[in-house]
Image: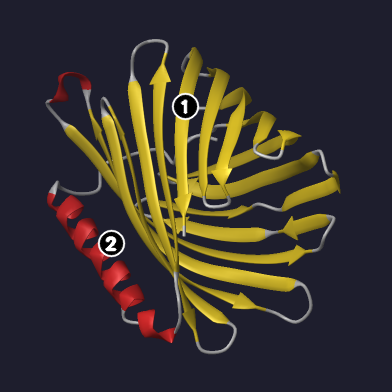
Amino acid sequence: MSEIPKRPVGSTDEMKKIIIICLCFIVLGNANLLAGPFRSITAFEHSYYLDRRTEIDWSEVMIFPLPGSFSLVTGINGKHTDDYSALGGSVGLAFNLPGQFYGQSTYALKKYREDTIGGATEVSSLFHSVLVEITYESATWLFSPSVEFKFSGDYLGVMIAPYLRLYPGGWGYFFIKYFGSVAEDRNELVLNNAVWTGLDLRIHPKLSIPVEGAVGSVNEAEIDGMEYTGTTGLNIWFSEKLALKYRFHYTFGESSAYNYERIKNTLVFDLGF
């Protein structure tokens, strides 16, 4: 699915502010370190497009147990391309509910920056978001609906995203996720809908093949469009906490402004402890 559209709302000094906020999220988490052992999940992605553009995504999530059935979840993440970058931080609370239910609430802050042609002008935007998610999980299926509110200086939106995963046997799992959003974008009402679905086929205890597809609208203020994406690849699990993943993505998009095709190869490194 496409990123939130970027639009000017500030200066380059905001990047320094968001770095400080990200560090505060981590310090807040470290203050609870003595409540019990914590988990850390690190991901690094490097993508290469056929037009020779590159993209780097990274994230670090830390989970700190708190007294009772709660955990503090803090994270930082970033993205960098040849002409676009993003840096974000988040802090949230994960909690257990009666039975096989659990949930999480998260506040996130993300700064987007995009250089115009020639790099002479910087276009930037700062977004806030609040996410609430409740999950039911059994041995054969998982259902996880969520609602997310996003806002910036001239953008206000809400998105619902129910997710269903089925485990029909030892061969892997099937999933489907729907995204529906409504937003006021620069004084214009914008609606978007998308569906993401796929299989993860287990061909060996340490190997699996994902086959995924997504279709959805990518409407923005004054621009209407549709996007179609197909994905496949390979997952290699060296251990329960270390994995290497390859993804091949093909995307075709059409809009009232222009049409486009993208082919992307992505290498993902996942480490958890």
Relative to the observer, which residue lies in front, 3 or 102?
A: 102
Q: CA distance from mark 1 to mark 2?
A: 26 Å
Residue 254 appears left or right of 37: right
Spot occupied by residue 218 in the image (x, y as percentages of width and height): 55, 32
The residue where tag 1 is placed is 266
Q: Indicate the quadrant where residue 57 lies.
A: top left
Residue 209 horizontal side relative to residue 53, left or right: right
**Mark closer to the observer (1, 2):** 1
Residue positioned most to the top: 51
In the displayed structure image, the side of residue 209 where residue 52 appears, left or right? left
Residue occupied by mark 2:
22
Image side of residue 181 versus residue 86, left or right: right
- Which of the 4 quarters of the picture holds residue 83? top left
The residue depicted at 24 percent of the width and 64 percent of the height is 23
> Residue at coordinates 27% horizontally, 73% vertically from top-left?
27
Question: Residue placed at 53% from the left, 49% from the top?
Answer: 183
